Image (spheres, helix red, strand yellow):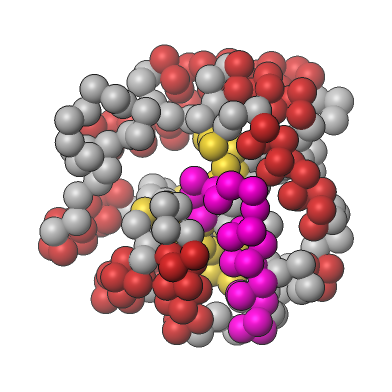
Amino acid sequence: MGAAWRDMRGRKTNLKNVKEMVKGVRALGMEACVTLGMIDAEQAKELKGAGLTAYNHNVDTSREHYPNVITTRTYDERLATIENVRDAGINVCSGGILGLGEEAKDHVGLIFTVATMPSHPESFPVNALVPIKGTPLGDSEPIPFDAIVRTIATARLVLPKTIIRLAAGRITMSEEKQMLCFMSGANAIFTGEKMLTTDCNDWDEDKEMFNRWGLQPMAAKEDESETSKQGSWESLKSEASATRTMA
């Protein structure tokens, strides 16, 4: 669940509402992840108390390239939010966006930032910029596919236990390219009707693709009653539907 906020300052009612949503999702037996912008230590503790499983706060790119793209918050402010989340005992979801006008060395810088955190994030989303007309990067050229694969492969080497998620931009990839990403080290996706403001791959389409390649979904990490690490497509689809309804 996400909100287009810079931070949570002065948003007591919003935070209260988010906590109720988190409790509702957890009552369904699902994990819950939110992205709400910058949060302080006390807000992180409140979200943990509500049962939040994970918090997404991307670092987006390397420290060196960051000021060329983002001015609404500093790199260190992003890292401070991630530290608050980690200290509260919430899983960290933090990755980047490829195609922001960066160079190959910035992909290395992005991975370096994440790999040298006190603890590796549980989830590392890899986004490919989806240019939107009228925005500052609306006329950007698509990131070369080999840059995506190289980033995934490198991240897998230095983040061995982290879930690497194919995120925004996946809808532009052919099935063969998506599978190459998985062979390179990716092991999760975002699926459903929308990825924030852009189109995302359809659930049934993803299910059929993974079935063709013999890939099975993992069960939720928190479900200690599971004797197998594999979940079922049916249960995951019902959970995804419930999450979209709650959001």
Residue 10 appears left or right of 126: right
Whether residue 27 is situated above or below residue 83 in the rendered picture: above
Queried whether the magenta region covers residue 119, the answer comes back as: yes
Tell me the quarter of the picture where residue 233 sits: top left
Residue 167 appears left or right of 73: left
Whether residue 122 is situated above or below residue 165 in the rendered picture: above
Q: Is residue 234 visible?
A: no
Whether residue 238 is situated above or below residue 199 in the rendered picture: above
- Provide residue 58's location: percent of width, then percent of height: 64, 53
Which residue sits at x=25%, y=56%?
205
Q: Quadrant of the N terminus?
A: top right
Which residue sits at x=36%, y=21%?
29
Which residue sits at x=55%, y=80%?
143
Specify the segment rendered in magenta: 103-124
Tell me the quarter of the picture where residue 139 sits: bottom right
Queried whether the magenta region covers residue 77, the answer comes back as: no
- Provide residue 79's location: percent of width, then percent of height: 74, 49
Residue 93 appears left or right of 140: left
Which residue sits at x=23%, y=32%?
235
Whether residue 204 is situated above or below residue 99 in the rendered picture: above
